Amino acid sequence: MCEDGIAVDQCFEVEIERILPGGVGLAHAAGKTVFVSLAAPGDMVRVRVEREQGNVLFASVVEVVTPSPVRIEPPCPYFGRCGGCDFQQLTYEAQLAAKAQIISDCLQRIARLDHVPEITVQPSPKNWRYRVRATWQIDREKQAIGYYERGSRRVCDVADCAVLMPELQETLERVRATDWTDLPAELKHLDAVAGENGVSLSPEFAEFRTNELSLRVGNEVYRYNAESFFQINPALVSEMVEFALDDVRGKTALDLYCGVGLFTLPLARRFERVMGVEGNPSAVRFAKRNLEQAGLGNVRVVKAGVAEWIPSSRDADFVLLDPPRAGAESVVIKGILNLHPERISYVSCDPATLARDLKKLIAGGYEIDAIRGFDLFPQTHHVETVALLRRLS
């Protein structure tokens, strides 16, 4: 029994005030904060409490009593069970507004900014069929292929994923049509990525190969495969790169967590010397090839963990970092501050860890010059954010 008489499994009505970081709806009841999954701001919903943690109740929608004006019928038959998409219940305009609010919330609550700039989130040209990359989970016992169910490690068997690009959807169908005896016994998941010249899968099996792919972004051509990271939504990548690099030019630049060189190549055209740092060996090989085929010889790419490498770095006019969802390690932020670059560009797929790291950079003598969201992940609460920082004089 929760305090104030609200018990786990109890149902009651609440009004959803807004969407919080993590994509849950915020409500209040009996002195408790209530987090409601798959809600829309303005909904009046009947919810069931699933668990409590301190003064917070975690709940799910049992019935939409009065729908929000921005609530729509989710078109995907797997919505609610599949853990992939959690914003299909919102109009696309409401999705963008929620993501802008999520970024603002994190800047205010975590970064402790006194004056949070107005956040805009650049919309994706495609709201559906945009993903060039996916990881498909495999349950041999149940003969299921798809994604994890929401909040569990059970596999939701998915025949048609509405956010996959057609080439990836066709590949999913071919994987699902493969005889189970042809799938390796130890296979638990498949990484898949599409390019302009086909689809690459890792690991290889049966007819499926880890092919080398290529994709043009702006004026650059990138090669990669399923063993190396590439952005999930190419329709917005060129604009994101352009914003992240702004008008920077100079002698030396660092590209941390550089992957296959998405930012490294255009940086090499702006700076005399560029250093790229990446821990994934496959990505490093592709980064070097991409630079070589672009005729860019003023770059050195090293295979190393950024946290282990950065203490040895000595100078940089400009630092770009694009870390994984967990954000940059504390030693990386410290290392960047020790370099005293004039400008920093931070590309992040998690507004919370971005805000955490921005707080440290601001305390270290930097200010936010500009910040913008890019909706690389329509139908989900995830958003890519780019923050441009300038050293205070």
Image (tube, rainbow, N blue to C red):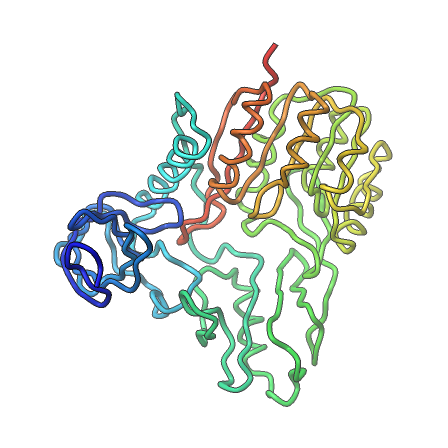
On screen, residue 384 above or below 380: above
Whether residue 38 is visible to the viewer of this picture, yes or no, is no
Q: Where residue 169 sits in the image (x, y, percent)?
A: 52, 68
Q: What residue sits 35% from the left and 37% below the top?
A: 101
Q: Where residue 92 sits in the image (x, y, percent)?
A: 34, 47
Q: Where residue 379 sits in the image (x, y, percent)?
A: 39, 54
Total number of numbered discs in the rendering: 0
Q: Residue furthest bottom?
A: 181
Q: Where residue 317 sits in the image (x, y, percent)?
A: 72, 21
On screen, residue 131 above or below 237: below
Q: What residue sits 70% from the left and 78% below the top?
A: 205
Q: What residue sits 56% from the left and 48% below the top?
A: 325
Check the picture and name the quadrant holding the C terminus. top right
Q: What residue sits 41% from the left and 32% below the top?
A: 120
Q: Nearer the viewer, residue 320 or 175?
A: 320
Quarter holding residue 264: top right
